[in-house]
Every structure is written in C-alpha cells, then in structure tokens.
Amino acid sequence: MKPILILIAFLFSINVFSQEVTLLYVNSSWNESNEYKHLNLLKNVKILKADYDDQPVKFKSKIKSVPAIILFDENQKLKRVWSGGLSMSIDVDPKEIQVAINNLIK
C-alpha cells in the first residue's frame, strides 16, 4: 500500500507543482552495478529516482527493463525513454540526453 501512495503523491506533485522538464530514473537494487553514472551531468532538468522493486505492479508493467531513463516535458507528457535492454545497462552519451532536454526547453 505504501508504494502506491508514494507513486500517487509523486504523480500529484508533478502535475500540481512542476512546470519543468522532468527526468525519471528507474533502477533496481539487484542491478546497482549497472547504475547510470552520468545523471549529475544533466542540467535544466528535475531528476527523480525510483527503485523498481518498491513500485506497484501497474508501474512495473510499464517498465520493460532497468535501468530506465524517462523524460517528460513541462506538461508531464512522455517524450523519450532510454532503457537498459538485455545488457541491463544504459550506454547512452549524456550529451544525447542533454540535447533532448534542451529541445524541450526551447
């Protein structure tokens, strides 16, 4: 029950208080060795982190692999997803993510 309340609070706070580009990073504790290490290089974006294992089944069913980086525009519309796939790691250049963020800010 607690993870569902956390997810509802998260979605509510995004919709009510946020009018900025948001990046949601999802990974699992069992996949910590494949943590994406470049989030701190990203600018002009609100970064939220979620542990896959703590999420409700409905949320988990939407995530195809971890880690996952999900980019939302200022209206919280899904704009881009990067995911680990079979390698269970994200090898995307942080510059590519920053370009996507910058394109949403314009």
Image (cartoon, rainbow, N blue to C red):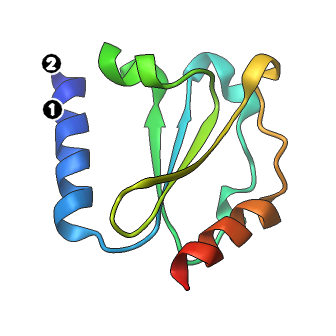
Give the structural element (helix, strand or loop) at label 1.
helix
Q: 68 or 41, which lies in front?
A: 68
> Would you say residue 56 is visible in this rendering?
no
Q: Is residue 101 left or right of residue 46?
A: right
Amino acid type, residue under disc 1 in the picture: Leu
Q: Which mark is residue 1?
A: 2
**91 shown above or below 60:** below
Instruction: Return the x and y of residue 18 as percentages of the image width and height.
Output: 28, 69
CA–CA distance between discs 2 and 1? 6 Å
**What residue appears at the point 78 percent right and 30 percent down from the top-left corner?**
89
**What residue appears at the point 46 percent right and 30 percent down from the top-left corner?**
51
Q: Quadrant of residue 84?
A: top right
> Would you say residue 70 is visible in this rendering?
yes
Q: Residue furthest bottom?
A: 106
Q: Is residue 72 left or right of residue 15?
A: right
Instruction: Check if mark 2's residue and mark 1's residue have beta carbons within 8 Å.
Output: yes
Instruction: Return the x and y of residue 31 as percentages of the image width and height.
Output: 67, 21
Q: Which mark is residue 5?
A: 1
